[in-house]
Amino acid sequence: MKLKGLMKAALARSNELLANDALRLLSRLMRKRGLIMEPTAFKGISQRLLESALMMQCPDIDQVEAEALSAGSCWAHSLPAEKRPELLKRNEQLMAELVNRNLPQWLECRWAHDADAFRLRLALDCWDRRGCYEDVEGTGLYGAICMELGEPERARSRFEHLRERIDFRLAYQPGFLEDLLTMNLWSRAKSAKPPGDSSDLADLVQKAAQLAFRGASTGILRRRHGAVLFEGGDNGYKVVAEGFNHIAAPLPAERAAALAGAKARVTQRHAEVHCLLQLRRLADAKQKQMLIVEVADVGPGLGWAEPCSRGCVQLLTKYGLTPIFFTDGQGALVERQLQHDPDLDVPYKTYARRLSDDRISERAWLDISSKMEMEQVVN
């Protein structure tokens, strides 16, 4: 596993998730393969399996099978037919007792809490051996783990080195910056300024990052984006509209029926489209600017937030927004000029010519079409 991946895993893989990995192994052996386990052996093997899993050393299914067989287990198909139903039912009872009674008790044991700290320290030690001070995402993950362990000073030298060349407001999420401020690991006064742009843009990044978290209340827990549509320049910026990824209304019934054979997907409205829908008129978007931020799924960083080709970049192009800015995941903003194309056929460029389901782009165009109709009625 790559070292940065190890740090992400240490933060993301809770004891409960690792315990689920262990349970899946037991379930496959007992339910899928028909391994009949003796109650005493089952409990011992289950606990050892859990302990190994929490230490990120979970054995594979063949190893667990070998241990179970050596402890007196047997295969259901090797038993007389009349005994199989009773023993298979006992298997189910053992699994139910493990899930409902033993596992919750074990996860409250001291060794389970120690395993969580072990994984975090393992990640830090590996990163220390690497000695990389330039990696923006890695430094954020490192700092988050230090804070989780109650050792923020361990990260000081890394943050001091990094803040000489980047503005942390372009790299990290608002809550993490508050933690860094509280622990005196960062201050605005000592932060490098964004190259070539007013520092106000960095404040807009933080505003968009705060917006990104609102999608969680609608069920968006991954790929969270926030966006601000604004006007202005060197003398400051005025926010005109705000948006964030969130669950949207499903497609009309006739379209849902047509897509019934496709893989089920929840319909989302992306942050860029959400911004456009907040405008009084879509025409008001012309010559405005937009900034998009993605908050990392794991860790305190900001990710690569380029507008997608499932309606977002097409609609921004159609309605004349330029330039657009988005976070690059490494403590900087990408600026991109878009060529205004008011006649762009958005459905053709997105969902209309695709053979596969693309509910996001279709939902986006339906929303924009509804807004255009409402504007016509008002006018």
Image (cartoon, helix red, strand yellow):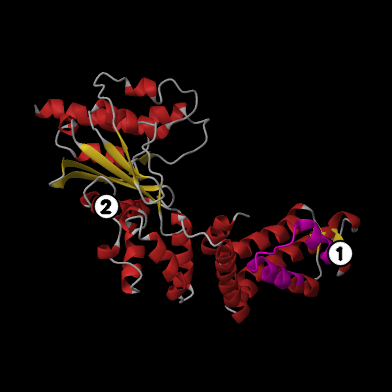
Q: Nearer the viewer, mark 2 or mark 1?
A: 2
Could you give the CA–CA distance between mark 2 and mark 1, rounded to whole angstroms? 61 Å
Residue sitting at 26 percent across and 31 percent down?
368
Task: Please state, as top left, top right, bottom left or bottom right, where the C terminus lies in the image.
Answer: top left
In magenta, the rendered stretch is 45-69
Q: Are marks 2 and 1 in contact (CB under 8 Å)?
A: no
Residue sitting at 31 percent across and 69 percent down?
181
Question: From where the camera sits, is residue 6 visible?
Answer: yes
Indicate left or right for 281 with 8 as reference: left
Q: Which of these two is toward me, 270 or 366?
A: 270
Q: Residues within 10 Å of mark 1 (few under 14, many from 20)?
A: some
- Residue 172 rendering spot, x and y as whole percentages: 36, 57
Callout 1 secondary element:
helix
Q: Earlier in the sequence, mark 2 or mark 1?
A: 1
Residue 38 forms part of the magenta stretch:
no
Residue sitting at 71 percent across and 68 percent down?
49
Is 349 located above or below residue 208 in the figure?
Answer: above
Is 143 located above or below residue 77 in the figure?
Answer: below
- Residue 329 rendering spot, x and y as whole percentages: 41, 49
Circle number at residue 202: 2
Residue sitting at 79 percent across and 75 percent down?
40
Choose top left, top right, bottom left or bottom right for residue 240. top left
Residue at numbered disc 1 = 69
Circle number at residue 213: none
Q: Which of these two is toward me, 125 or 71?
A: 125
- Residue 105 rendering spot, x and y as whole percentages: 60, 77
